[in-house]
Amino acid sequence: MLNYILSRFKSSIVVLFVVSIITFAVLMIIPGDPAQLILGTEATPDVVQELHSAMGLDKPLYEQYGNWLINLLKFDMGTSYLYGESVTTLILNCLPITLSVALYSMIIATIIAFIFGIISAIKKDSVIDYFSRSIMQLGTAIPSFWIGMVFVVFFGLKLKWFPISGYVPASESFLGFIKSITMPSVVLAIGEFGLLLRIIRSSMQESISQDYMDMAKVKGLSMGKIYLKYALRGAMVAPLTIIGMQFAKLVGGTTVVETVFALPGLGRLVLTAVEHRDIVLLQGLVMFITSSVILITFIVDILIMFMNPRIKTFERGE
Amino acid sequence: MKKILSLLMALVMLLSLSACSGDNGSTDNGQTTNPTDTTNEKTELTMGYQTDPEGLDPQRTAAASTFSITNNIYDTLVGVTSDWEIIPRLAKSWEISEDGMEITFALRDDVYFHNGRQFKASDVEFTFNRLKDAESPKAGDYENIVKIETIDDYNIKFSTEKLDVELLKWFAYPWTAIVPEEAVNNLKTEPVGTGAFKLKEWVPQQRIVLQRNDNYYGEKAKLETVKLMLIPDATSMIAGLQVGDLDIIPLTGDQVTMIEGNPEYSVVSQPMNAVQIMSLNTNNEILANEKVRQAMAMAINKDEVIEASSFGYGDKIGSHLPSTSPDYYDTNSVMEYNVEKAKELLKEAGYENGFEIKMTLPKNYQIHVDAGQVIADQLSKIGIKVNVELVEWGTWLSEVYGAKNFETTVVGHTGRLDSYAFLKRYKSDSDDYISLKTGEVDALLEQALQELDDNKRKEIYQEIQIILANKLPAIYIQAPHTMFGMSSNVEGMSIFPIDVYDFKDVYFK
């Protein structure tokens, strides 16, 4: 087990390093000069050139990258040119928002997907099965910015149930906090639950058709126990992997929904960093998001190991 | 099973813990005001904005998003009214030497920075040296000022290299805001000025809160707090005004109809000191032909373009000055919409069967994208096939503006207080992405810069506008309007010829 964690850790470092080089290279290749962006359309070419050097952008690439890397090893992600604020502070400001929305929406999506997924698997081709299959398709097909706008107008403007936009920190008012993240979380959950539902439905069906299910029935166990204890446990691996992937995706920021609901999350910060070519800020964000994705997949892998005895034995056998 | 459950529980707790510990204690206490409270005591204004400022340091950016805010935190030597009139601000009065090469400001002696230190002439000298250093985006504009002399604590003299009759106007721009030397290292996040408001907090991506400066030298602001909320989405923005979360929002033409005519709201609208133009790259063989450019101008129905891109909230223009400028001369009749004549001109130019041309549009600016697409459609009627390409703003700046690698584009240019600064890109040696290569306006521009007689100067600018309208280094489309939607109890919000907000005179009825 320890060996496994260690080897995972080593490969993660390599991934992070490669990602940082790729981000840096891409930023250098794509058109758009930070100095030009600061100056806008009223600048003369020599002014652009002067600011370009003042910002250190004319230094050789390896030197710019090297400086950044050395600072990173000292746990200093640098200062954003755009905000004049340290990158760490900027990320830490956005993180609680993104994490709470990601977690909240995954809880909603998981609950809906499990309830409908299990029922549709057990009662295949029933009314509930058809119903869940159609809402699953709708949820996946409708773009989230559109649902977001409909929510803003209907629940925010007409019914006034939820605030239209903005974020209330939990430390200020817990109810306000829940209210401010409910609409965006529901919108995100609508986008995510479809895929999860489909996976749960098919793994559950497969699990039900296994031989040991007949065995359990013959043994005279109650149907509830058979489905929830044996069938569901066998069907957990695939959904768990998907939940992990979806959660990791949401932690990486959900720019569109954050924009519609004016949530100051990571996705918007990434967008701002790209639009302004704030290289230091973007590098920091990419590093952070990559690390979170690595961490989440790692946790999910360990969870699956506990869930699935076959993987556990395999590891032990090594 | 138990192990898994406890692991899951631990994970959930960990995550929710980090969710609660956020926002580093930046709660503010002035939050309890009820938004529906409309009594006279209401002194907290909430405004929506769409782009975060690029830091709050006036000498380290060229972004309008910064200046809108910093104008309330810092002061300039002179100010400008909505009617383009220059008024005293930190300077009580000024005197221009007889030859026009020197300007001496007499400064107020009752001004204090937000950190408590008194404002002196040495701060002005420091600020202008900082404005002229390498890291300052506006340094190039102030090359003409060659000497700054502090005469005593409250008098300062600026000397120029060559005569600029509009010298005074250079001291009204928001990037000349006076900063204290001791605070310059952190001005981006911790601005210290002399203005009517202090910065209470700025949470990037969320809000900016300004608080009244009770030590202000002039008439104190009527509002106690101005809360600016970042709302990037236009639908959410207008919904925020409708439920009463926001008192003022910036509006675009398509949204005006949503609140116009409703007594609960009011709309302020004024033509911007800015022009939307379609630049034509005359390095392109086809576009180098003057008749082609004229044919294109005549084939464009500007009213239709304004209707589609600004819902009618724009003033048609024929040259590179907006209708609000004191030097504006109406050149709309020079290239009037006439498809038949356009076809004829195209035939004379030898392109009877039309041609294909590329149009690069900045996709971050809906108004330019919409205008460009309508223009593309209109040009197709005289046989010109326009291939529209949408690019991101950073790409537009480096490819089109910087590298001049384009055929046609539609974009906006923000105006200045003096026409010379606004028009100097048309000099044949400007190395700008557009310029009038024939050199016809070079001498006229220099003449205007040195002409002391106001009327004669206007005549020169009139001549320049006529030349541009005929030669068409660009096709001039409109001066779009700046618009605010406000709840009807808000008064005193004005629109200025430079991109700034001024909350000092705003109040609730």
Image (cartoon, coloured by chain):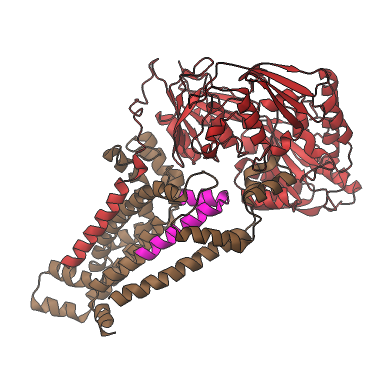
Chain colours: A brown, B red
Q: Where is residue B503 in the image (x, y as percent from the top left)?
A: 52, 23
How many callouts does the rendering have? 0
Q: Quadrant of the C terminus of chain B?
A: top left
Q: Position of residue A94 (x, y in %)?
A: 41, 48
Relative side of B202 to B12, left or right: right
Please tell me which residue is depicted at 76% across the width and 32% down the height of the picture.
B146
Q: Where is residue B421 in the image (x, y as percent from the top left)?
A: 75, 32
Please tell me which residue is depicted at 24% across the width and 75% down the height of the picture.
A308
Q: Where is residue B290 in the image (x, y as percent from the top left)?
A: 87, 44
Q: For the magenta stretch, what is the residue range? A: A267-295
Q: In which quarter of the image is the N terminus of chain B?
A: bottom left
Please tell me which residue is depicted at 47% across the width and 50% down the height of the picture.
A87
Q: Is residue B200 magenta?
A: no
- For the view shown, which residue lies furthest in the bottom direction? A317
Vertically, is B405 above or below A203?
above
Q: In which quarter of the image is residue A177?
A: top left
Q: Is residue A268 magenta?
A: yes
Vertically, is B330 above or below A34?
above
Relative side of A23 to B13, left or right: right
Q: Nearer the viewer, residue A256 or B493?
A: B493
Q: Which of B454 and B438 is in front in this view?
A: B454
Work out whether residue A294 can be spotted: yes
Per the picture, the main secondary structure of the magenta-coloured stretch is: helix
Relative side of A113 to A54, left or right: left
